[in-house]
Image (tube, rainbow, N blue to C red):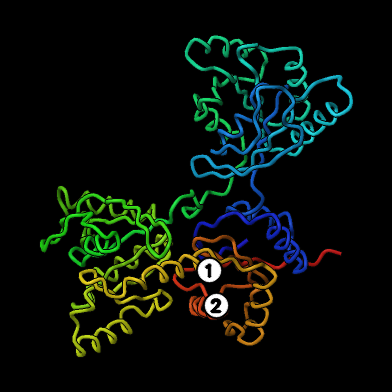
Amino acid sequence: MDIENEYGEVGALDDADYAEFMELAAEEGFDLDEVAGDLAAAGHGPLPVLAVVGRPNVGKSTLVNRIIGRREAVVEDRPGVTRDRVTYEADWNGRRFKVVDTGGWEQDVLGIDASVAAQAEFAIEAADAVVFVVDAKVGSTDTDEAVVKLLRRAGKPVVLCANKVDGPSGEADAAMLWNLGLGEPYPVSSLHGRGTGDLLDAVLEALPEAPMQSFGNSVGGPRRVALIGRPNVGKSSLLNKVAGEERVVVNEMAGTTRDPVDELIELGGKTWKFVDTAGIRRRVHLQEGADYYASLRTAAALEKAEVAVVLIDAGESLAEQDTRIISLAVEAGRALVIAYNKWDVLDEERRYYLEREIEKDLVQIQWAPRVNVSARTGRHMEKLVPAIETALAGWETRVPTGRLNAFLGELVAAHPHPIRGGKQPRILFGTQAGTKPPRFVLFASGFLEAGYRRFIERRLREEFGFEGTPIQVSVRVREKRGRKK
């Protein structure tokens, strides 16, 4: 297989899109095993599956809640609460995987208990790896020994969890579980979280390589907005104005702010987390002392944000620093809003020249919402929230695979790639591999020139919007296989 161009990190396709994607590959005559392998290598495909098994009442559901980071699985202090296989999505250290909570497995049981045990066995069979939970206080029982035999027959990687180890005194009990022959028992208190980090590190080693979690996956809570810009463009003044109080220090001297200051602010009927950052100066590596670390903290604030509001001093000519800061936000894949501050002091002549500067220097980000504000007077502050919401909506937009391929078919038919060297490459099919920002992967019969890829991006925006967000288009080039009969 030839990969003709570099492409960025992409998130996992959901199961429905993955299946539709593979159907398209089959229709085009690709070798499906190779396509699946390529997608897996690129971070696509179904997430690896971890089954959590054990006899009743050893704390499997409590451990599942600990792994997924929320109380989702029903937990009661009695055996047999969980009966079905229940699947949740989890992540650890940027790796994503599915966790299957199972009912307690018992041998030689009848009726509903037999059905519960069968469900657990199905979960083991379908899993890529297994966490076997044993009550360290009780030690291994005959039922645990039977589960071990079941796991050995299945041949799946197993991580042994010695649960209910609430302190150092219980670690000796955990060590006794070496005799199960499954390797190192990890002492864990799923109730209190003790030892779960080491357990999950072992789980990641046991699971096949999983798609990395993109920065944009929601962690809940207010949407996170980073105010960025070069020093003294009015970031702190803007934060004070939207907060309705003097929340951060404002001074004529550039570079007053050194630490990012987080502020929960009610604006437009919603709560937002605004991060006021130190101004980014040019040549970070030449800075010294506090200014150097301020730039690093600004970069960290941008990394944690979902949307960047870039403040530009409308009263001054656009500087190289302004365009570089915008590029930082775009390269980081953040939703983007451009706010021209100090609009109240502009005369007609300056507004005319500013428009010409924007057309010349910011032509690559015409998709970003623009607001003209005054942090000093509060002018047009009410326009900031709609612009942020528009950018976030574009950032999270997903196009169904079927609709995307219908669009691509019409596009290629109406505007085919130029013929180069006697060959005319064409797009065979594609899919949206992720959101936050939107990321597309196109399968093509030959190399697509950079100009044609930019044309595709422009038409994607015209068709589907994507206002306020960068989008990433990756191309995979493959030799077409003969169709299977």
- The reply, left or right, for residue 44 in relation to residue 215 is right
Foreground residue among 25 and 478: 25
Percent of width and height locating residue 425: 62, 77
Residue sitting nearer the eye, 108 or 458: 108
288 left or right, relative to 472: left
Res. 307 image quadrant: bottom left
Q: Residues within 10 Å of mark 1 (few under 14, many from 20)?
A: some
Residue 447 in picture, x, y percent from top left: 57, 72
**Location of the C terminus (image quadrant):** bottom right
Seen in the picture, residue 147 relative to 224 is either above or below; the reply is above
Quick one: label 1 or label 2, which is nearer the N terminus? 2
Residue at position x 71%, y 68% in the image = 480
Question: How many discs mark residues in the rendered view?
Answer: 2
In the rendered image of this protein, does residue 462 appear above or below residue 186? below
At label 2, the amino acid type is Ile
For the residues marked 1 and 2, what is the alpha-carbon distance in whole angstroms?
8 Å
- Residue at horizontal 71 percent and vertical 31 percent from the top: 156
Quarter containing the N terminus: bottom right
Residue 376 visible here: yes
Instruction: Identify whether 363 is placed above or below 138.
Output: below
Q: Which residue is mark 2?
A: 456
